[in-house]
Image (cartoon, rainbow, N blue to C red):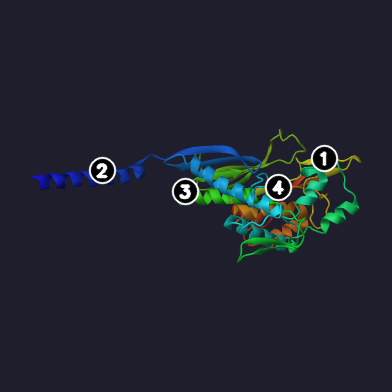
């Protein structure tokens, strides 16, 4: 009798365990929204799942912040900039390799060592309105260039040819953060999600409201306050990594009345001055799209289109100023990837 009771109890325990394993798969999925701040900007993450994964998502963003955020004094990149003896992590190494590739294919238009120049022009810690002299620019250019920094892959350390070299991943980290969060969501079985960090986006599947995600390309309006938000074009997509860069918000007029944009050409040391107002890029990863959109803004229309056409995994949508307002220029792959 006792043996029979034991078997019954064991059977009930196994049934209960099986039910616990089965229940999560039967839970109804719904869309969740997680929002917050990272890298000095916002994040907005929507995903369909059986539970709210905000703690885990925050943990992924914290990993990125502790590796690549120049706003975090304890991050790896901040310690590299202080010339500490620091071992870099896998996130940093992957960023470094992709940044090196984009520097190469853009002929130096994209360069994560450009930070000191950006700062000198008043888009970092210095006050806006400061116009550096040619001598000051030339002095800084001596330690700006990807060729002056290397990654020791065996010892996982960064080597600089000049201790004044400063790395800034701001033009690549937001897109990379989207990739990292998207990869985590996919690992948890999510098939429908949109990860938006500071306007850089990685999305998959469909939205809560329809069969596709609706993304807006912002109209480039001179508005340093960032309060004016108009949409130039709406695209509807299912799976996409997309990033935008522009010169229409972060700028100032110097003492001589000349407009200075925050996009600084690392090859000349000066803010760019051409007709390209914004560049939106599709690529195989958020990180690549982020870096390529910055490179486009440095290069200008003709060279940007040439670079994108030569890059197999990329397409671009450029908005340019002309005498009558704006006009749009797109790469050959753009219309193949999006639906208006």
- C-alpha separation, residue under disc 3 versus residue under disc 1: 45 Å
Tell me where residue 196 sits by quadrant.
top right
Q: Secondary structure at mark 3?
A: loop
Residue corresponding to mark 3: 191
Find the residue positioned furthest to the front: 85
Badge 3 or badge 1: first in the primary sequence: 1
Which residue is found at the position 78% from the left and 57% from the top? 144
Q: Position of residue 168 (x, y in %)?
A: 70, 51
SS assignment at label 1: loop
User: CA–CA distance between discs 4 and 3?
Assistant: 28 Å
- Badge 4 or badge 1: first in the primary sequence: 1
Frontmost residue, 49 versus 119: 119
Residue 59: image location, x then y, percent:
53, 45
Mark 4 or mark 2, earlier in chain? 2
Residue placed farthest to the right in the image?
A: 256
Query: Would you place residue 230 above or below residue 241 in this image?
Result: above
- Which residue lies under the disc numbered 4? 245
Q: Which residue is mark 1?
A: 128
- Does the rendering let one see residue 183? yes
Tell me the quarter of the picture where residue 285 sits. bottom right
Near mark 2 (Cα within 10 A), the count class, few <14, some 14-19 or many ≥20, is: few
Say which residue appears at 58% left-offset and 42% top-offset: 214
The Cα atoms of the two marked residues, 3 and 2, are separated by 29 Å
* Above or below: residue 323 compared with residue 100: above
Q: Nearer the viewer, residue 103 or 59?
A: 59
Q: Which residue is mark 2?
A: 16
């Amino acid at each position: 009798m006792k043996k029979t009771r034991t078997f019954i109890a064991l059977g009930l325990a196994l049934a209960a365990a099986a039910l616990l394993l089965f229940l999560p798969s039967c839970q109804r999925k719904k869309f969740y929204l997680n929002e917050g701040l990272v890298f000095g900007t916002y994040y907005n993450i929507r995903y369909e799942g059986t539970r709210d994964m905000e703690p885990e998502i925050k943990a992924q963003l914290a990993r990125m912040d502790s590796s690549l955020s120049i706003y975090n004094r304890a991050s790896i990149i901040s310690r590299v900039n202080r010339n500490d003896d620091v071992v870099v992590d896998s996130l940093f190494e992957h960023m470094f390799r992709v940044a090196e590739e984009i520097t190469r294919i853009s002929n130096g238009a994209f360069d994560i060592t450009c930070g000191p120049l950006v700062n000198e022009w008043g888009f970092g810690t210095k006050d806006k309105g400061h116009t550096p002299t040619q001598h000051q620019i030339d002095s800084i250019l001596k330690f700006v260039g990807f060729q002056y920094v290397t990654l020791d892959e065996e010892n996982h350390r960064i080597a600089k040819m000049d201790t004044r070299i400063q790395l800034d991943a701001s033009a690549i980290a937001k897109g990379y953060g989207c990739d990292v969060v998207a990869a985590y969501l996919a690992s948890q079985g999510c098939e429908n999600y949109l990860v938006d960090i500071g306007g850089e986006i990685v999305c998959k599947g469909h939205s809560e409201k329809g069969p596709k995600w609706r993304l807006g390309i912002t109209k480039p309006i001179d508005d340093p306050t960032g309060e004016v938000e108009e949409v130039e074009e709406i695209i509807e997509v299912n799976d996409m990594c997309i990033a935008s860069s522009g010169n229409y918000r972060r700028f100032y007029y110097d003492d001589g009345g000349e407009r200075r944009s925050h996009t600084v050409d690392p090859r000349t040391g000066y803010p760019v001055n051409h007709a390209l107002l914004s560049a939106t890029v599709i690529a195989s990863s958020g990180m690549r799209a982020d870096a390529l959109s910055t490179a486009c803004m440095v290069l200008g229309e003709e060279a940007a289109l040439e670079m994108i056409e030569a890059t197999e995994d990329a397409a671009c949508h450029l908005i340019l100023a002309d005498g009558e307002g704006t006009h749009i220029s797109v790469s050959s792959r753009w219309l193949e990837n999006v639906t208006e």
